[in-house]
Amino acid sequence: MTLSLVRVDDRLIHGQVIAVWLRALGADVIVVADDETAEDEFLKDVLILAAPSGVEVEVYTVDEAAPRITELAASSQRTFVLVRSPISVLRMVEQGVPIPLLNIGGMGAASNRSKLYRNISASTSEIDAMHALERLGTKVEIRIVADDSAVSFSSVAPPATNSNGV
């Protein structure tokens, strides 16, 4: 498996992702799985242009990304997957995408989110999605920058709000 990292970062491709994470991972390709971004040609172009030379950027809806990420996971290409929300990752895992580890790195404050850990905020549905991912076998960790020590989601998470976790 060559999924170098699957990361939730609501800013997707930005300076920290390029300067720190991409360098640490040595990824060959960045896959952005986000419905809104995939439908916005201008935003797609901006993300593609933001990547350094030699790093391919592919932008898909979450459902389009699922088979592509599965394919890349079985290839020799080192792949960095970026999504805006853990809900997207849950959708992909439910479609059979093998995601053993999810990194929570950039989830900013919003009116529907409350503080989870440091500057990471999450909505009730995002917290439920992370609980569901853990029940499905995906380890969920919080690590804002590559040099940080990983913090287990379950060590800081409030309980799921319903019995099925979504």
Image (cartoon, rainbow, N blue to C red):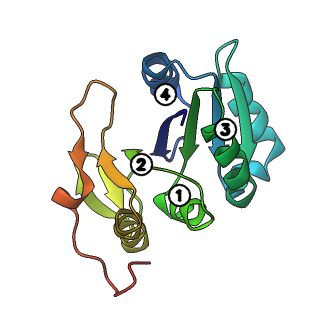
Q: Residues within 10 Å of mark 2 (few under 14, many from 20)?
A: many
CB contact under 8 Å: marks 1 and 2: yes
Q: Residues within 10 Å of mark 4 (few under 14, many from 20)?
A: many
Residue 72 disc label: 3
**How far across and down, in percent of the image, does residue 129 sit?**
42, 68
In this rendering, which labeled residue sits more in front, label 4 or label 2? Answer: 2
Which amino acid does the dot numbered 2 rest on? Leu
- Residue drawn at x 65%, y 49% is 33
**How far across and down, in percent of the image, does residue 110 sit?**
41, 60
In this rendering, which labeled residue sits more in front, label 4 or label 3? Answer: 3
In this rendering, which labeled residue sits more in front, label 1 or label 4? Answer: 1
Q: CA distance from mark 1 to mark 4?
A: 18 Å
Check disc 3 and report its element: helix, strand or loop.
helix
Q: CA distance from mark 1 to mark 2?
A: 8 Å
- Residue drawn at x 60%, y 40% is 73
Q: CA distance from mark 3 to mark 2?
A: 16 Å
CB contact under 8 Å: marks 1 and 3: no
Residue 89 disc label: 1
- Counting residues from the start of the chain, the first of labels 1 and 3 encountered is 3
Q: Is residue 98 above or below residue 149?
A: below
Q: Determine which quarter of the picture holds residue 109.
A: bottom left
Which amino acid does the dot numbered 1 rest on? Val
Residue 17 disc label: 4
Which amino acid does the dot numbered 4 rest on? Val
- Counting residues from the start of the chain, the first of labels 3 and 2 encountered is 3
- Residue drawn at x 52%, y 18% is 26
- Residue drawn at x 27%, y 24% is 147
Q: CA distance from mark 1 to mark 3?
A: 16 Å
